[in-house]
Amino acid sequence: MKAIRSMFFALAALVLLASAVGCQPGQATGPATVRVLTMEQAGPTVDEMNAIVDAFNKANPNIKVEIEYVSYDALHDKITTAMSSTPPSYDVFLVDDIWYAEFGKAGYSLDVTDRITQDMRDKIFPAAWDITTVGGKVYGMPWLLDEKYFFYNEDLLKQAGFDAPPATWEELLAQAKVLKDQGIVEYPIVWSWGQYEAAICDWVILLYGNGGSLVDDKGAPAFNNPTGVKTLTWMLQTIDDGYTNPASISYVEEDVRNVFSQGKAAYAVNWNYMYDLVNFNKDESQVTGKIKMALMPAFEGSGVKSASINGSMGFSVAATSPSKDAAWKYIEFLTSESIQNQYSAHLLPIWKTSFEGENLTKLQGYTPANAVTVPMFNEQFPFAHVRPKVAYYPEASKALQLALQEALTKQKSPEQALNDAAAKWVELAK
Amino acid sequence: MQRKRTLAQQDALVAFLLILPSLLIILGISLQPIVSTLYLSLFEAQRGINVQNVFVGLANYAALLNDPVFWVTIQRTMYFTVVSVGLELVLGLAIAQLIHSHPPGWQFLRTSLIIPWAVPTIVNGTMWRWIYNADYGALNGLLLQLGIIDKYIPWLTKPNVAMNLVILADIWHSVPFIALILQAALATLPADLEEAASVDGATAVQRFLLIRLPLLRPAILVALIVRTVEAFRAFDIIYVITNGGPAYGTVTISYLTYLEMFSFGHIGRGSALSFLISLFTLAMAFVYIRVLYRPEETL
């Protein structure tokens, strides 16, 4: 009996201990902790982001920011999983423009409309506010204004006898034929057409560059028409003709950068961050000093001069966060004009005022890359298109990725594949 | 007599109390999620704060069973499972036999065998993604130098090729597991049976098929159950190497569940899928045990 009794005591002690561990520590003591989830990809490096956190923590002794990084492809699912616990695992998270509608509807992102000052409204690009605003409510602070750019290897083009980059996709193919025939490069252009969001970004560039669009005024799918079919057929044809690197069907942006950095492609389409790495970073690139940027081409006869994809992101406060004010304070610091100017090598500021007058000269002088990317941003951004703002975007996107891939791997005709995806979009909108 | 039974009861009570903590942990960690998954699968459940779930009974299951995508995915998953586990068993058995015959350096071989198995699946997947890369991957480099191909091949751009390459990566990772289990079992087999058979004139093939293989059956059973269940639920290696592409060509049932549950936020439908996976794996384990397990042969 004695053994049993001591067993009971031991068990009781164990249960007590377990419940004590489970207790929440009091909120009153110590500085408020703000946990931040962001990505390690495009934009500032981890070292730069950590430096911003350190500066903020030093200036605000009553707030302690802790930051975590994931890859872009894991970010969405990590946020939605984190938000299912109370309190959420993160107080601040980075949100891609295509998720704002979903997170607003799900109640994950805090409505910060009242926290936006008139000064912010006036000085930040309207296009940046469009990213974080859904149905008139602001769900986050813009942070990263990005779009895809057209890159070319000037050295390879000169070898083929071309002094200027192509202005249209037709002209690009004509140049590509010479590059290929002369054996300068086997596959002149490389894309990110893998089964990822990256494929949608490249598709938007080509579709809008052909005068098409993803959805019509009422939000119904508008890509399954002759323009869409023509664009997708063009993509397929460039693979068959050997102008597009056939591995593009499995590639994302980093693969594009690696191939382009090795001089194995004369043209590439990628985000802003690639310019600094390919043209200036000798550890990452074999073609430093040879890379130029140009306005994204469009198709002849489409009436379009250029078209690109808007891939901007913003920071949101978790709606269920216990420390909303501290979280917002950090976001304000992170997106302030001075911080954004300081780290502009990998991230162009959201502030219109950074691009005006004396500030523009300063901004272009911050890094060697800025001298090229800042004017290029001004030139290209008016042509950047946003993807539909719908709560079911991830599923709609996956259906369209599948359609593109089915056509590119020749399992379905472009027409059939696009019709199937459009039918799925209609079903999702119900 | 009366006193003795009380003692036995006391022993039983102590025994129960001793296993109670682990029982609670097992119930908490494995039973509770299964029960709540089953519960959620009966609702039209969406993601979000203060979202009301609507009870729909078995509608999620009915929708899945009527969806051609589900059945295509099941077929693809079965292909992945059968091919990878089948080849792993054959290769694993061959390697186990090789080590068992104690060639020079067999101890080194046995130790180095653990390396692929010890590599985390995500790392393994990343490694193979690089190896398969069309423009700077080791596979193209190797085949080109050996003169087998005359130009680089974009490996991961055809659905069936991509599937077989993912299987190859999975085999590389998991063969050591089967080889080590079978090698350990071989080491415990009594040698006299085979010696006697040898004296009686049985050939090596006969000895292998009629003596060694039946004696290995319990070990094979364990290896097969573990590997089949793992292969059927394969996710991470696919996520890293192909992300389900090209054109859904490598989307297995676990990957589909991940898409529904985490990417699309269909918690109800995703739960129904997870529960179906549990039923499928349970059924497979049951079949294995019925076919392979003979209680009297337990070593």
Image (tube, rainbow, N blue to C red):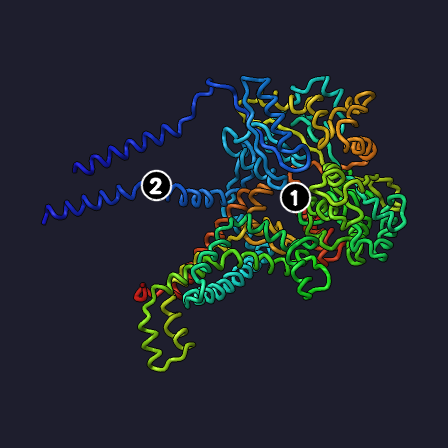
- Residue B54, position in %: x, y? 53, 39
Q: Residue at x 74, y 30 (%)?
A: A348
- Front residue of A388/A157: it is A157
Outermost residue toward the bottom? B201
Nearest to the eye among marks 1 and 2: give it.
2
Q: Residue at x 61, y 22 (%)?
A: A55
The amino acid sitting under disc 1 is Leu
For the question of whether residue B33 can be seen, the reply is: yes
Mark number displayed over residue B24:
2
The residue to which callout 1 is attached is A428
Q: Quadrant of residue A137?
A: top right
Q: CA distance from mark 1 to mark 2?
A: 42 Å
Outermost residue toward the front? B104
- Residue B272, position in %: x, y? 51, 48
Q: Residue at x 69, y 66 (%)?
A: B147
**For this view, does B197 lie left or right of residue A278?**
left
Decide: few, some or many residues near mark 2? Use Cα within 10 Å; few <14, some 14-19, many ≥20: few
Decide: few, some or many residues near mark 1? Use Cα within 10 Å; few <14, some 14-19, many ≥20: some
Instruction: Write down the chain letter for disc 2.
Output: B
User: Are dots 1 and 2 on a single chain?
Assistant: no
- Residue A104, position in %: x, y? 63, 31
- Residue B269, position in %: x, y? 54, 46
Q: Residue at x 72, y 39 (%)?
A: A281
